[in-house]
Amino acid sequence: MTVVVTVDVETAADEADRSAVIREAAKIASAFDEELHVVHVLSQSRFREMEQESVEDTGKTIEMDAIREVARDVADEAASGVVEEYTPVGLVGSADDEIVKYAKRQDASYVVLGGKRRSAVGKALFGSVTQSVLLNAPMPVLTVPPEDADA
């Protein structure tokens, strides 16, 4: 089994908060002697931007495997130097859907992700990946609050 931790570098979450989330997930993985998978989901909008750039630069569309590799590299960069043993994973699509699907495929024992400070109105208007994963994942989900949550 695995522990799946998600990292999002496309939002304003800072590196310290991402590192804290990864460290918490590593503690769980270590405690249960499980693999740690560090996952980054590249959004559909970012995928379209990259595809457009590829067409403009080379006249060819970019392969989906290359896009997943970019996302995997983001996950690898986020975890490098924070934990020693992990598997970086790159996915493309709607973050909440892709995280839940991946966790199910891996038969993950836990999903760990960062929480954000957002008002109830903000959640209703903009949605929340964390909230959606909490509601839809069939396994336990741990949210790690931002370091300034008490501020």
Image (tube, rainbow, N blue to C red):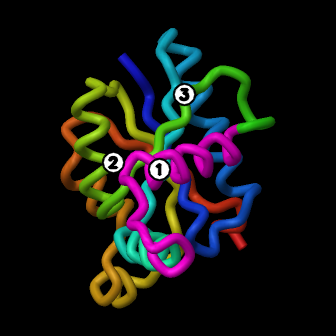
What amino acid is labelled 3 in the image? Thr
Q: Regarding mark 1 in the picture, which secondary structure is present there?
A: helix
Which range of residues does the magenta coloring cover?
A: 55-79
Q: Nearer the viewer, residue 70 or 9?
A: 70
Residue at image point 50% right, 61% down? 115
Indicate whether 7 appears above or below 57. above
- Which callout, 1 or 2, points to the residue nearer the camera? 1
Residue at image point 68% right, 47% down? 78
Residue furthest top as drawn: 33
- Which callout, 3 or 2, points to the residue nearer the camera? 3
Q: Regarding mark 3 in the picture, which secondary structure is present there?
A: strand
Q: Nearer the viewer, residue 84 or 141?
A: 84
| Label 3 with label 2: CB-CB less than 8 Å | no
Per the model, the C-alpha gap separating discs 3 and 1 is 17 Å
Which badge, 3 or 2, is on the more N-terminal residue?
3
Q: Would you call the spot at circle 2 few (<14 residues within 10 Å), some (14-19), or many (20 or more)?
A: many
Q: Regarding mark 2 in the picture, which secondary structure is present there?
A: helix
Residue furthest right as drawn: 81
Which badge, 3 or 1, is on the more N-terminal residue?
1
The residue under label 2 is 99
- 63 horizontally vs 54: left or right: left
Indicate whether 99 appears above or below 52. above
Residue at image point 61% right, 46% down? 73
- 114 horizontally vs 1: left or right: right
Instruction: Tell me residue 137's x, y (percent).
Output: 23, 44
The residue under label 1 is 66
The residue under label 3 is 87
